[in-house]
Amino acid sequence: MKNSIILVALLFCMTACSSKSGADLIEAVKSNDLEKVKKIADSKNVNATDEMNATPAMWAAYNGNIEILDHLVKKGADVRKKGIIGINTENIPKTYTNALIAAAGEGHLDAVKYLVEKAGVHPDEKGDCLNHFMIYP
């Protein structure tokens, strides 16, 4: 009986907590869904990574979404964390390794300014520039 109760509790927790996973947060950020991000972002998942170690903050910077980026930072997102966002547009692969490079590479000046002025990223924190011809699955 005790094992059954523990199993039910674990299943309940897994089901209830699944909407707060890092994958769900990253998908909400990628789709620019601010309301969903506000509902599921917390200190445990704001630095979650996808399969290429890209964080929600990197994806928000890539999208140029200052509201989402600000919300993530306020929840504790590490805007200096490195990962890879690899996008193949018009047969030209672009690869970004952190939030600042993602924002700058996509021409989102407001996101660059936010990262430097509000989030405290120093402009010299460029990281690795991997914009050579690398294609990721």
Image: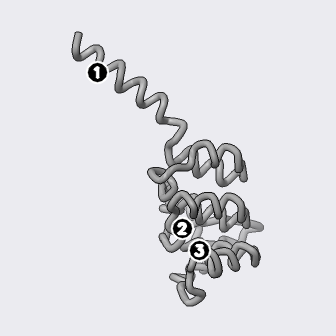
Q: Is residue 1 left or right of residue 81?
A: left
Q: Nearer the viewer, mark 2 or mark 1?
A: 1
**Residue at image point 51% right, 48% down:** 22
Q: Quadrant of residue 90?
A: bottom right
Amino acid type for the residue under numbered disc 2:
Ile
Q: Nearer the viewer, residue 86 or 82?
A: 82
| Distance (Cα) linking label 2 and label 3 | 20 Å
Q: Is residue 45 left or right of residue 32?
A: left
| Distance (Cα) linking label 3 and label 1 | 42 Å
Amino acid type for the residue under numbered disc 1:
Ile
Q: Is residue 63 above or below residue 123?
A: above
Colour treatment of the image: one colour
Residue at image mark 2: 84
At which x and y percent is residue 78? Answer: 50, 67
Q: Earlier in the sequence, mark 2 or mark 3?
A: 2
At which x and y percent is residue 99? Answer: 59, 71
**Residue at image point 65% right, 80% down:** 117
Circle 1 residues within 10 Å: few <14, some 14–19, many ≥20? few
At which x and y percent is residue 13? Answer: 41, 29
Farthest residue in the top direction?
1
The mark found on residue 119 in the picture is: 3
Amino acid type for the residue under numbered disc 3:
Ala
Residue at image mark 1: 6
Farthest residue in the bottom direction?
124
Q: Is residue 88 left or right of residue 15?
A: right
Q: Is residue 13 above or below residue 55?
A: above
Q: Given contact means CB atoms under 8 Å apart, are the residues at marks 3 and 1 in contact? A: no
Circle 3 residues within 10 Å: few <14, some 14–19, many ≥20? some
**Labels in figure, total:** 3
At which x and y percent is residue 96? Answer: 59, 73
Q: Nearer the viewer, mark 3 or mark 1?
A: 3
